[in-house]
Image (spheres, rainbow, N blue to C red):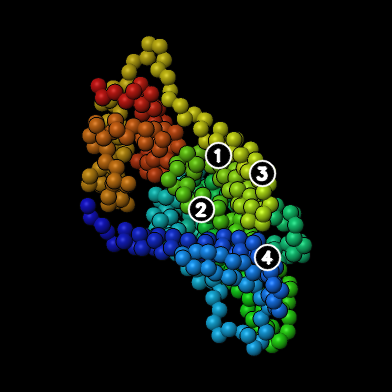
Amino acid sequence: MEFFTGDWLNAIVRLAHVIFGIGWIGASFYFMWLDANMAKPVQPKTGVEGELWMVHSGGFYRVEKIHVSPAEMPPHLHWFKWEAAFTGITGFMMLCLVFYADASVYLIDPAKADLTPVQATFIGIVTLLAGWAAYEGLWRSQFGQKGGWPPLAATFLLIAGIAVFLSQIFSGRGAFLHVGGLMGIIMSASVWTVIVPGQQQLIQATREGRKGDPAYAAAAKQRSVHNNYMTLPVVFIMLSGHYPSTYGHPQNWLVLILAALVAMAVNHFLNMHNKGEMKAWPLLLAAAIFVPLYWLTTQGTGSASLKPGEAPVAFAEVRAVIAGRCNSCHAAKPTDDTFKQPPNGLVLETPQKIRANAQKINARVVLTQTMPPANKTEMTDEERALIRAWIAQGSRLD
């Protein structure tokens, strides 16, 4: 099997994105936990707000949160900023490599909107920038600075509205990844536009022997909390590409919104648990939201029943459809102009391979209709119905 230059570039950027993302997300969860578990020192110490003892990797660690005098200012501080920067940069590179470079396959859905690759790419980038600008404007306004639930609700509605909009013009997977990309940009940009400047003014004030502006600290803490609550929805979006029943659902925007609410409720439980508040209501809320989400994504997934007197579907008809609509990609030597290797190594050239992968075909071709990508080979509804009936009848090879 050949490995092409584009595959290597994709693999390297994807790996870098995962590595930087793990570092950044891990730091976010760690510091949320750390702040929640700081306690007053048993023996009061001058300038020490709180401390925490830990044991890990064969040693004891004591972490202190302190007031630093100018004389105590260390020569080196780790800011946890480059992880955020490179997570955002590599994430955008992934959007370019996958969705913009092959927009006709992964981003455009002709059944939703008649777009050229250039138009689709333009809409995607403008939506990301406009969404970020709207978020920044909201939280820098007097309305946002008052805090509380109203601006949080407005932020959620902003992102949900963008999800609905994109789901109407892009492929399901393209819409999902752009919503995730928007949240990723918001998170990464917040580090550099709010959190880092807040830290810089704190360091400068400390060096000058004065107290830092509490407004900067409050804004930095606020954005850190926002980033923490966006983390799990973004992780869900990253994983959703493996589950076509999410992004391929006719109401995929609703699936995304409900899944994000479940993820944030679970995150809230974890944050409360870190503070020692063992309350079950966030998990109960997550379960209550998950019930309609589960119902929504499992409707119509059962096998179609064979009607009395209905003639069985001949495998020759099914094989002809797969040969005409699927084998340009899913062959040992694809003829498609985008895929030089069969996607996911799936080859559908023999009756045995087709039958062995009947449920995969059912999920992608019949239920979610995410294959062929962007319906590139123009599979008809009648052909999908034929495949569905063949699978329902037991995937017979006669």
Q: Which residue is mark 4?
A: 39
Spot occupied by residue 325 in the image (x, y as percentages of width and height): 32, 38
Q: Which residue is mark 2?
A: 235
Q: Nearer the viewer, mark 3 or mark 4?
A: 4
Q: Quadrant of the C terminus?
A: top left
Residue at mark 1 to residue at mark 4: CA–CA distance: 47 Å
At 73% from the left and 77% from the top, the residue drawn is 213
Of labels 1 and 4, earlier in sequence is 4
- The disc at residue 251 is 1
Residue at mark 3 to residue at mark 2: CA–CA distance: 23 Å
Residue at mark 3 to residue at mark 1: CA–CA distance: 30 Å
Spot occupied by residue 300 in the image (x, y as percentages of width and height): 49, 29
> Three-letter amino acid code at disc 3?
Ala
Say whether marks 1 and 4 touch (CB < 8 Å): no
Q: Residues within 10 Å of mark 1 (few under 14, many from 20)?
A: some
Nearer-the-camera pick, 146 or 282: 282
> Three-letter amino acid code at disc 2?
Val
Res 326 quadrant in image: top left
